[in-house]
């Protein structure tokens, strides 16, 4: 289950929230473009970042290889979640998927990349979601 926001969580965002991740282990699941960006953001605030993907690391390309040079640990399997304080998943990773079972079993908060980005922002945000009406709503 994706972590639910509490009022206290909503009040702590931006640099203040990012600073709480320094020295803490965060696992990023899914290493396409947005997963790589999430890992870089977390690494930039001195989080101990572990990253994992269903595909073999060798097939993921240069950008993923550059993560290792930036201090991100590329880890396969359940070991990716050992000691994690937070798990950040890419949109294509199902929150109910078996790869997240170790994190769920330990009660580790699981958030999506979109929430990570929102929490990292200093400014207020309005999000419009749903199947119908987004264009109409934004035009009002």
Image: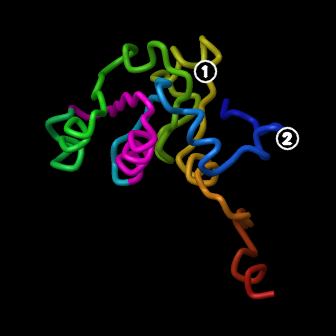
Residue 58 in the magenta stretch? The answer is: no
Question: Is the residue 81 above or below the residue 110 in the image?
Answer: above
Q: Residue 75 occupies which quadrant of the picture?
A: top left
Q: Residue 71 occupies which quadrant of the picture?
A: top left
Residue lying farthest to the bottom in this orientation? 139
- Magenta residues, start to end: 34-56
Mark 2 lies on a secondary structure that is helix
- State left or right for residue 134 relative to residue 29: right
Mark 1 lies on a secondary structure that is loop
- State left or right for residue 73 relative to residue 103: left
User: At which x and y percent is residue 133?
Assistant: 75, 75
Task: Please give the residue where the numbered disc 1 appears in the rendered image.
Answer: 108
- Residue at 58 percent across and 28 percent down: it is 96
- Residue at 63 percent across and 54 percent down: it is 118
Q: In the rendered picture of this protein, how many numbered marks are placed on residues? A: 2
Classify 10 Å Cα crowding around label 1: few (below 14), some (14-19), many (20 and above). Answer: some
User: At which x and y percent is residue 7?
Assistant: 85, 41
User: At which x and y percent is residue 78?
Assistant: 40, 15
Question: Is the residue 66 above or below the residue 21 in the image?
Answer: below
Instruction: Say which quadrant the C terminus sits in.
Output: bottom right
Question: Is the residue 133 above or below the residue 11 in the image?
Answer: below
**Labelled disc at residue 7:** 2
């Amino acid at each position: 289950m994706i972590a639910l926001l509490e009022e206290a969580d909503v009040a702590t965002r931006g640099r203040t929230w990012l600073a709480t991740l320094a020295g803490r282990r965060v696992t990023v699941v899914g290493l396409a473009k947005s997963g790589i960006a999430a890992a870089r953001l977390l690494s930039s605030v001195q989080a101990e970042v572990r990253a994992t993907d269903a595909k073999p690391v060798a097939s993921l390309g240069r950008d993923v290889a550059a993560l290792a040079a930036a201090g991100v640990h590329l880890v396969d399997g359940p070991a990716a979640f050992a000691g994690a304080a937070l798990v950040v998943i890419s949109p294509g990773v199902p929150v109910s998927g078996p790869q997240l079972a170790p994190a769920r079993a330990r009660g580790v908060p699981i958030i999506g990349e979109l929430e990570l980005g929102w929490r990292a922002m200093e400014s207020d945000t309005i999000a419009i979601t749903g199947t119908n009406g987004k264009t109409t709503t934004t035009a009002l």
